Amino acid sequence: MVRPFQSAVFFRAFAVLALIAFSLVMTAGNSLAQSGSKPLNLGGVLQTKTKGAPPPRTYLKLPKEMPLPKVKASRAAGDAAAPAEGQMEAGSEAATPSDLQAPNAQTDTPAGQQESGQNPADASAMQAQTPPQPAAPKIEPGGIARLQLAAFLTDSGQPLQRGMNWRIFEEKKDAKGQMPMVHNSDGGALEVELKPGRYIIYAGYGFANLTKRVILAKAGDYSESFVLRAGGMRLNAIAAGDITLDSALLSFNIYTKDTTTNGTQELIAKDIMADHVVRITEGTYHVVSSYGDANAKVRGDVEIKAGELTSVTMIHNAAKVTLRLVSEPGGEALANTVWTVLTPGGDLVKRAIGAFPTLALASGDYTAIAKQGEEIYNRDFSVDAGLDRDIEVLAKLR
């Protein structure tokens, strides 16, 4: 027989143990729900009820498999609709230098593949959904394919009538691994007769150019247009104060605006003379103007727009000086003189040999050192922008 006191103690202990067990179960269930729902929601939350104590517990229902997200397949860049049967336009596509080495290489990336956090399995599914590339047209040998070529500066411009250089190569490489050139001519629009086949066509307009792969599937008439997106750049320079400089001493180098991986800018055009029009692809370029071959240089960025001629005038703080070693002021210059021009800090600016060398120097202070035989003479002088003058160094008698 159980006494009332013992029964009360028993039931009280049982209640405490039940409460502790309930707390542990709830803590474990909540922890599982929080860790499973963040950051990835694996499934819906279900609640199950049991009869009596403890109260309902929370579980996660995990799906048997993770379905891949539905991604709309995109057409690859080269998967354009083919021309209707009977059209004789040349099948072409833009070709880069890498295309010339590996014409069949595919470099396009399907849309959406670069999205952040994408599962590699998603990319595989997208590639599987991408439709296959259409087969290249089959070449039907025999007959003549007449190809008309025209080049334009802009989409809405007129065809260029001169200044073009056309080069046509057979796409099939020879035994030396080279693509044989079958045509090379200068001028404007071009009409050329070729045998059916695959060709690489280079259209050059000064420093602007475009290369395309063209397929002439069978005998007939074909046409191909090249939109070069090019403009012109006319370069000139003056001295400060709108003073004309000696154009024979002016030259210009054109570089890319952006630097390469080694921190330098790529040289595009070298030693361009003043007032010469440079034909070049639209974009922003870095131009360096040199007056002479010493230290008179200025630089700046120039923007070129397609179909427009941009005139650029750069301003030099420089002038020409003619060095003369004389026995007396205004006297005859002594021949076979070796000249060295230094900055006040002793940095070498220019060396020259002769009776009266002419140098273009940036504005500033200099020292001219003249060596005649074993004798050495010197003189300090200054250069002012646009002020050309003679600098006489007096050979003093000892």
Image (cartoon, rainbow, N blue to C red):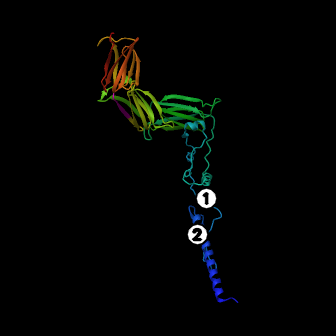
Q: Please tell me in which quadrant of the rendered image residue 318 appears.
A: top left
Secondary element at tag 1: loop
Other-residue count near label 2 (Cα within 10 Å), few / some / many at <14 / 14–19 / ≥20: some
Return the residue at label 1. 68
Q: Please tell me in which quadrant of the rendered image residue 213 appears.
A: top right
Q: In this view, does 347 lie above or below 125?
A: above
Q: Please tell me in which quadrant of the rendered image residue 201 appears.
A: top right
Q: Residue 124, labelled with which disc? A: none
Query: Is 330 placed left or right of 143 in the picture?
Result: left
Residue type at tag 1: Leu
Q: Position of residue 103 (x, y in %)?
A: 60, 39
First reached walking from the N terminus: tag 1 or tag 2? 2
Q: Gap in Å between the C-alphas at discs 1 and 2?
A: 28 Å
Query: Is 15 placed left or right of 323 in the picture?
Result: right
- Front residue of 303/394: it is 394
Look at the image and give the residue range highlighted in magenta. Answer: 310-317
Return the residue at label 2. 30
Name the residue rendered at 65%, 89% in the picture: 4
Q: Which of marks 1 and 2 is in front?
A: 2
In the orientation shown, which residue stands out farthest toward the right? 1
